[in-house]
Amino acid sequence: MHQPEFTIGIEEEYLLVDRESRALAVAPEGYLEGLQAALQDQVSPEFKQCQVEIGTRVCGDIAEAREDLKRLRATVSEHAARHGLSPIAAACHPFADWKREHHTRKDRYDGLERDLAGVARRLLICGNHVHVGIGDDALRIDLMRQMSYFLPHLLALSTSSPFWQGEDTGMASYRVSVFDNLPRTGLPPDYSSWAEYQRSVAVLVDLGIIENTSKIWWDIRPSHSYPTLETRIMDVSPRLEDALTLAATTQAILRMLWRLRTQNQRWRTYGRFLVGENRWRAQRYGVSEGMIDFGAGTIKPFPPLMEELIELIGEDADALGCRDELERIAAIASSGTSATRQRATVAGAEAAGSDHTAAMEAVVDSLIEEFHEGL
């Protein structure tokens, strides 16, 4: 069987913050124009005026993706600094009020505001999308069905949004709670074929409800624009290396599923009801509590679960040249995610005598610092 290319592309959404106040800042006049002159179509505005989105080129391996993502992050930061701003890569700003942030005036975003009303106005959130090149339509749908099992694990590893409007939500990923209010989100349907997927989508397109599949926002989807599977469940990662770890893990899981197929095997698929329970556990706890292992019929702590995943897909990571990145999931599982660190920053600041406002500002400072690690 012909091996897919398994090329990789990473899209990240950032928030712009004022370096003095740590509050969100609208992209100033000339900022996006300067970025687009430097990065061309690899940068674009996002839904909110305080956001910016970047996308790597099509990369042959994770090493190539690292260099491109590093360049993109550094350029976004350099241009922001000229205006007294900094980007942060967190799925939610720790203390911003979504009611004060307005959407970007662009036909696509005007349409979202009109169609989705108050639900859209709360979308002060940032995600990380990983594209993996799989050129065959039928294979994309088959692998999407099986990949759904692993989406909660990726979400748990990525969690970076414990705070919302200055309050601890109790969630590791509050972003998911916000995004799930939109239609056509969550785990994808269990399509048995590419034709079934096309027939299903055509119903909404023919009725004029959506113009194309770019308005389908499942946790994983066949990309509208590229011959890729696009994994969308993850919070954006403050640290460059964490973003690369998640991308490499996604890439290696998909190669493992393809490898099973070449051996006339496949990963067992479970219904949305059961996988959704693990999705909730990831959203609520991140890596701090266990996840259901449906085959074993137990709830396993996250660190040994990740050790099992490394063993399962290690040979695929070796083939793709991303073993080092894959093995970092063990460190994330044991030490915690950005959500863990953000809460620790607040606890440390308050223990040192800071009030809650200053503690929230300290979180933003830590997110600025993490964004620039390795640049």
Image (cartoon, rainbow, N blue to C red):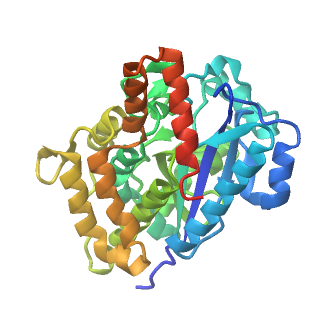
Image quadrant in which you'd find residue 228: bottom right
Question: Total of numbered circles in the picture?
Answer: 0
> Depth check: 111 or 232 in front?
232
Relative to 52, residue 255 above or below: below
272 left or right of 106 in image: left
Q: Position of residue 294 (x, y in %)?
A: 18, 49
Q: Position of residue 372 (x, y in %)?
A: 58, 50
| Residue beneath the point at 30% across and 44% down | 275
Q: Name the outermost residue toward the bottom.
A: 1
> Depth check: 267 or 153 in front?
153
Q: Name the outermost residue toward the top.
A: 355
Q: Position of residue 240 (x, y in %)?
A: 52, 55
| Residue beneath the point at 41% across and 72% down | 322
Residue 181 visible? The answer is no
Residue 12 visible? The answer is yes
200 left or right of 268 in image: right
Q: Considering the image in quadrants, where does the C terminus appear?
A: bottom right
Relative to 225, residue 288 above or below: above
Q: Position of residue 96 (x, y in %)?
A: 60, 22
| Residue beneath the point at 48% across and 78% down | 4
Relative to 131, residue 176 above or below: above
| Residue beneath the point at 49% across and 55% down | 243
> Depth check: 201 or 272 in front?
272
160 left or right of 281 in image: right
Q: Considering the image in quadrants, where does the N terminus appear?
A: bottom left
